[in-house]
Image (cartoon, grey):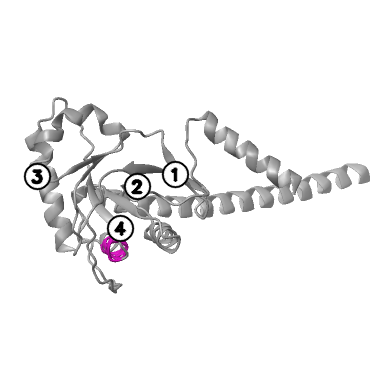
């Protein structure tokens, strides 16, 4: 018992040393939400569903910041992802559009808004209704866009990224968002079946990557066969040379 206490105290001190405030023994406040900040469409839906179920079971109000998706929205992985997000939404999760990754210098607010509008429309087609825009730690440099972005949707910022909530059942520290209460949209959840013969309609780059992977498998197979043949040839040659060598020694001894 003493060892467990010491180990727990050591973990607590380690978290505190890294500037993380731990709320392991208390419930969240009325206007506090655990944040799943960067939720990508093509990550594991099973792991995301596990997190959602844990947060729902432990009655944690939470926010999901869904990342933009620009292509392959008809892929089975996208269907699985949106079903999990819809499920989370039906359980009370507040869905926010995550601020996009900006790869262009001097991006203008209207460009960002155009991206977010497309994302909103796309998610709504899947029955997901984002309630705002989430700006994380990496987006603080774009805070000057806030006023213009709020003409489209409310902006919610993780202004204190060092303040996190330790969820014991997940054994993780997650960002904590303090804000006015976000509206809840309930939506029914029903898993969709994905056909085994789904046509991925890959482009040229995807086809090239697929063909290259196939060729690599063929080359590996040919290489393995070559190694086996070469090893057999060495073994045969060694056996034959050994036989010939001993025959010569026997002949020399008789002479």
Q: Are marks 1 and 2 in contact (CB under 8 Å)?
A: yes
SS label for mark 3: loop
User: Which region of the structure is painted magenta?
Assistant: 79-90
Q: Are marks 4 and 2 in contact (CB under 8 Å)?
A: no
Image vertical order of residue 40 relative to residue 201, above or below:
above
Q: Are marks 1 and 4 in contact (CB under 8 Å)?
A: no
Q: Mark 2 highlights which residue?
A: 32
Which is closer to the viewer, label 3 or label 1? 1
Taking the image as shown, residue 129 lies to the left or right of residue 54, namely left
Taking the image as shown, residue 28 lies to the left or right of residue 101, namely right
Q: From mark 3 to mark 1, how far is it between C-alphas? A: 30 Å
Q: From mark 4 to mark 2, how far is it between C-alphas? A: 13 Å
Q: Mark 1 highlights which residue?
A: 165
- Which of the two discs, 4 and 2, labels the residue nearer the N terminus? 2
Image vertical order of residue 124 relative to residue 29, above or below:
below
- Which of the two discs, 3 and 1, labels the residue nearer the N terminus? 3
Taking the image as shown, residue 169 lies to the left or right of residue 120, namely right
The reply to whether the magenta stretch includes residue 87 is: yes
């Amino acid at each position: 018992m003493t060892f467990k206490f010491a180990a727990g105290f050591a973990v607590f001190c380690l978290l505190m040393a890294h500037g993380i405030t731990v709320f392991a023994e208390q419930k969240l406040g009325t206007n506090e939400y655990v944040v799943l900040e960067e939720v990508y469409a093509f990550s594991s839906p099973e792991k995301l569903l596990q997190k959602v179920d844990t947060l729902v079971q432990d009655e944690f109000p939470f926010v999901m910041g869904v990342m933009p998706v620009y292509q392959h929205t008809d892929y089975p992985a996208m269907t699985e992802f949106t079903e999990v997000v819809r499920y989370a939404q039906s359980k009370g999760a507040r869905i926010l559009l995550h601020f996009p990754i900006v790869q262009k210098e001097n991006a203008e607010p209207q460009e960002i808004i155009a991206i977010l509008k497309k994302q909103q429309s796309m998610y709504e087609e899947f029955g997901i209704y984002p309630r705002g825009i989430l700006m994380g730690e990496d987006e603080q440099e774009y805070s000057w866009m806030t006023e213009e972005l709020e003409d489209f949707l409310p902006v919610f910022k993780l202004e204190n990224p060092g303040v996190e909530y330790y969820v014991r059942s997940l054994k993780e520290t997650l960002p904590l968002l303090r804000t006015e209460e976000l509206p809840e949209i309930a939506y029914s959840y029903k898993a969709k079946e994905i056909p085994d013969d789904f046509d991925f309609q890959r482009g040229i780059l995807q086809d090239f990557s697929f063909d290259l992977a196939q060729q690599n498998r063929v080359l590996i197979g040919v290489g393995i066969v070559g190694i086996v043949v070469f090893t057999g040839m060495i073994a045969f040659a060694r056996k034959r040379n050994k036989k010939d060598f001993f025959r010569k020694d026997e002949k020399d001894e008789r002479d």
